[in-house]
Image (cartoon, helix red, strand yellow):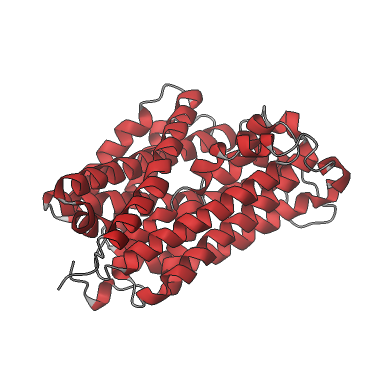
Amino acid sequence: MKIVRSDQISISQLTVLNTSMILGLSILTLPRATSEKIGTPDVWISIIIAGFISVALAVICAKVSQRFPGKTFFEYNQQIVGKAIGIAFSLVFCVYYILMAAFEVRMQAEVIRQFLLDQTPIEVTMITFLFVAGYLLLGQINPIARLMEFLLPVTYISILFVMLLSVQDFDVDKLRPVLSEGMRPVFNGLLSTALSYSGFECIMVFSAFVDKPQKMVRSAIIGVALIIVLYTINSVIVIDVLGVSESSTLTWPTLELIKNVEMAGFFLENFEVIFIGVWLVEIFTTYIISHYIASLGISKLFRININYVHIGLLVVIYIIGIYPSDLNGSIKLGELIGNISLVTAGVMPILLLLIASLRKRRQTP
């Protein structure tokens, strides 16, 4: 793929895109998902281990992409595994990101209905969200990267600040004893974090636009490391203050924690509204990146103008997002996406790097 100068992104923008893609809904649901599986206060250990695994896989994604500068995953996978298998890989990638986009748009509507606009139909919220996203998507990758570069520091620091307001009720003794039931519960919780860390495989697509591909490994490590820090702090505070049993039964444990924050003499109240506002920005960025990658893949596979694909996918994503009859159905969609991510973020990159190394496949003229 020929990359013009206006489409290029810096290595810092790649890091921001990577982090923004991962950071989304999971900041609200991760404590519940992990505490259900683990059943002990050792949730934070599972999150850290899963984070290091994600770092390793992100490095693999960067390594395989470095072999094919200027080409996206949708192009170079066919050079490695052949046209038929490469097309199959690309289709799975596209379906994965379409489902991811539909999941994000549906869940943001569910949160808004429950905590902000309880009388507003989720259809209205979803359509409004999609229209705003569609406008940005028509600007292509460079405006998207610049917007993410501006938004991520603001949202990251704001989310961290609001969560740290809850430390007034923190008691480290509630996290003890560490590993009271051994490592088995910790390992049981690893799979439940699949969706929480999924998204770093976007490196294999955005690598084609990077001006300094030789620095992608460092970018991949930093991007996932930022998420590990935020997820660990979030899970430690939520599990400590609310407890494992309560966290496992609440749909949005992080929001329930923030609702109870009270700061005497502080000029702001209703911290959950502030948190949701900031969180919606991150959901928006995750959606934009998911939609863009799916559109780019379909455009490459079927040789269709990407702007037409953007518009067509708005309809497809809305239909998929509105299909679950209730919140439980939406959560099941998220579990399906987590399972698919084991393939897109784990199996595919490892296979591609292994086969490319054995066959000594690199960029061809």
Residue farthest along the front direction in this orientation: 358
> Considering only vertical position in the picture, is 257 above or below 303?
above
Which residue is at a point 46% across and 47% down the rendered structure image?
Answer: 198
Tell me, yes or no, if residue 192 can be seen here: yes
Residue 179 percent coordinates (x, y): 77, 40
Q: Is residue 132 left or right of residue 84?
A: right
> Considering only vertical position in the picture, is 267 above or below 276?
below
Q: Is residue 227 left or right of residue 286?
A: right
Residue 195 percent coordinates (x, y): 49, 42
Tell me, yes or no, if residue 281 can be seen here: no
Which residue is at a point 73% across and 30% down the rendered structure image?
Answer: 246
Residue 100 percent coordinates (x, y): 39, 42
Task: Give 311 or 304, whichever is nearer the viewer.
Answer: 304
Q: In the rendered image, which quarter contains the N terminus? A: bottom left
Which residue is at a point 80% across and 51% down the rendered structure image?
Answer: 167
Q: Is residue 169 left or right of residue 145?
A: right
Residue farthest along the left direction in this orientation: 303
Which residue is at a point 24% across and 68% down the rendered structure image?
Answer: 362
Q: Is residue 129 left or right of residue 316?
A: right
- Number of labelled discs? 0
Residue 138 percent coordinates (x, y): 26, 58
Q: In the rendered image, which quarter contains the C terminus? A: bottom left
Residue farthest along the top direction in this orientation: 325
